[in-house]
């Protein structure tokens, strides 16, 4: 039992470390979509139950910090009530005039409209105040949403009480109202390029609107020697740990594959890696032996070529375990863009701008695109995943890799995105 104030502080710290972590793993803090009251209540209940078992195990291991079960249950109950109230009310709280940030968009083209559409669903504390119409652009938004012109940006910002100006001009040479924007900037109003603002909102890059100069002058895209070094150290540690933990499981999986269908246990396939060099990727076989007798095709939802055992291996991601040997060998990293087949890469590079830029880093067993977007099986899906891949390369860091690993655990637990 608790004997000192230090013990009580230690217990409190552990409680407030572990309970939010349990909430994270049941996606209680997922802001990609609005959760209903029922969904919030269910997730909180699961989170509290998980927290009870985790904390109980911790107290069993360290009996000196043991608290009574009644106290623990009461603390978890109060925490759950607080979570429910916060999730139900935080949207209203953030929309209060003192907390909400009013946004005006300079430009009325497709990019500005896209930002207006996604803003309410992504950030509750952003309020769209209207468009500022440039003199040389045709009006493509309703008249009622236009709050001013480029000749009077400063006055418009003051009138609408805007906190941010999003610059979304199709053409800037000779038409960017520098003097007006500078007045706003020096008055404390934040000025953001539309592409950078879209990146902040969504966690991806709008590839089709980017030009080469944006890549050159934007922050990020600096894969330094230190980054390469720490990723390699982590790759070796993660792959060795994974191989050791999975060693007892591998013979069982191999036997199940052999009993379920004819063919080899392992599936080998050429993939494109860093610097567009090809390498041999290993996976447990999940399809019939003659799955590609008519040529390479993307896997589809409920693909008939997938075996019964293969379907289970895909949903649980067990089929990816042999890729740990690719990581150990150095062909892949634990975190990075997923490696694609040479046939598809050649086709996608012709259809999607900047597709080859994803090959500046090693491909990964898991990646930002894998935890943010379901399995891709078309050019459109590949474009969407490229937006996430380039965002990852631009913002590559230790914290980013840790976040992706934690998100991957959730993906495996909930079985999302498998085909």
Image (spheres, rainbow, N blue to C red):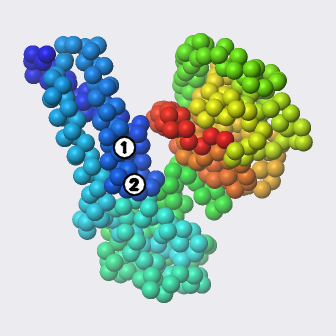
Give me the residue at 82% from left, 24% from top.
262
Q: Earlier in the sequence, mark 2 or mark 1?
A: 2
In percent of the image, x 46 and y 53: which residue is there? 32
**SS category of the residue bearing label 2:** loop
Q: Which mark is residue 228?
A: none
- 317 relative to 303 in the view: left or right: left
Q: Residue 255, percent across and down?
A: 71, 16
Q: Quadrant of the C terminus?
A: top right
3D distance between C-alphas at marks 2 and 1: 10 Å
Q: Residue furthest left?
A: 4
- The residue located at (55%, 38%) in the rendering is 415
Q: Which of 153 and 251 is in front in this view?
A: 251
In the depicted view, which residue is nearer to us: 238 or 179?
A: 238
Q: Name the residue under label 2.
A: 35
Q: Residue 392, relative to residue 183: is it above or below?
A: above
Q: Would you place residue 70 above or below residue 204 in this image?
A: above
Disc 1: which residue:
43
Q: Cβ–Cβ below 8 Å for labels 2 and 1?
A: yes
């Amino acid at each position: 039992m608790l004997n000192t104030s230090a013990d009580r502080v230690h217990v409190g710290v552990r409680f407030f470390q572990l309970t939010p972590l349990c909430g994270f793993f049941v996606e209680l803090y997922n802001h990609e979509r609005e959760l209903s009251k029922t969904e919030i209540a269910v997730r909180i209940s699961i989170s509290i139950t998980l927290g009870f078992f985790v904390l109980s195990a911790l107290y069993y291991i360290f009996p000196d910090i043991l608290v009574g079960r009644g106290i623990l249950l009461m603390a978890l109950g109060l925490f759950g009530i607080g979570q429910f109230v916060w999730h139900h009310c935080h949207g209203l709280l953030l929309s209060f005039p003192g907390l909400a940030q009013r946004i005006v968009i300079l430009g009325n083209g497709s990019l500005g409209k896209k930002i207006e559409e996604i803003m309410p669903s992504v950030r509750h504390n952003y309020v769209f105040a209207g468009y500022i119409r440039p003199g040389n652009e045709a009006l493509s938004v309703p008249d009622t949403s236009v709050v001013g012109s480029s000749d009077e940006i400063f006055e418009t910002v003051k009138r609408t009480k805007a906190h941010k100006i999003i610059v979304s001009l199709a053409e800037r040479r000779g038409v960017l109202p520098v003097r007006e924007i500078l007045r706003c900037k020096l008055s404390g109003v934040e000025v953001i390029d539309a592409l950078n603002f879209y990146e902040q909102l969504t966690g991806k890059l709008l590839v089709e609107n980017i030009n080469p100069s944006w890549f050159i002058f934007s922050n990020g895209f600096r894969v330094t020697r230190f980054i390469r070094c720490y990723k390699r150290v982590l790759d070796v540690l993660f792959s060795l740990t994974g191989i050791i933990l999975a060693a007892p499981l591998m013979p069982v999986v191999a036997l199940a594959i052999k009993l379920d269908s004819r063919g080899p246990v392992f599936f080998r396939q050429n993939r494109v890696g860093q610097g567009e060099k090809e390498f041999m990727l290993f996976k447990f076989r999940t399809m019939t032996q003659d799955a590609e007798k008519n040529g390479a095709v993307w896997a589809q939802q409920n693909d008939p070529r997938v075996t019964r055992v293969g379907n289970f291996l895909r949903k649980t991601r067990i089929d990816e375990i042999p890729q740990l040997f690719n990581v150990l060998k150095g062909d892949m990293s634990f975190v990075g863009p997923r490696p694609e087949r040479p046939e598809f890469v050649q086709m996608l590079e012709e259809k999607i701008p900047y597709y080859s830029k994803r090959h500046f880093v090693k491909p990964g067993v898991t990646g930002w695109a894998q935890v943010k977007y379901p399995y891709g099986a078309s050019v459109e899906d590949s474009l969407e995943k490229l937006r996430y891949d380039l965002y990852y390369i631009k913002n590559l860091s230790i914290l980013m890799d840790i976040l992706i690993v934690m998100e991957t655990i959730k993906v495996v637990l909930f079985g999302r995105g498998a085909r």
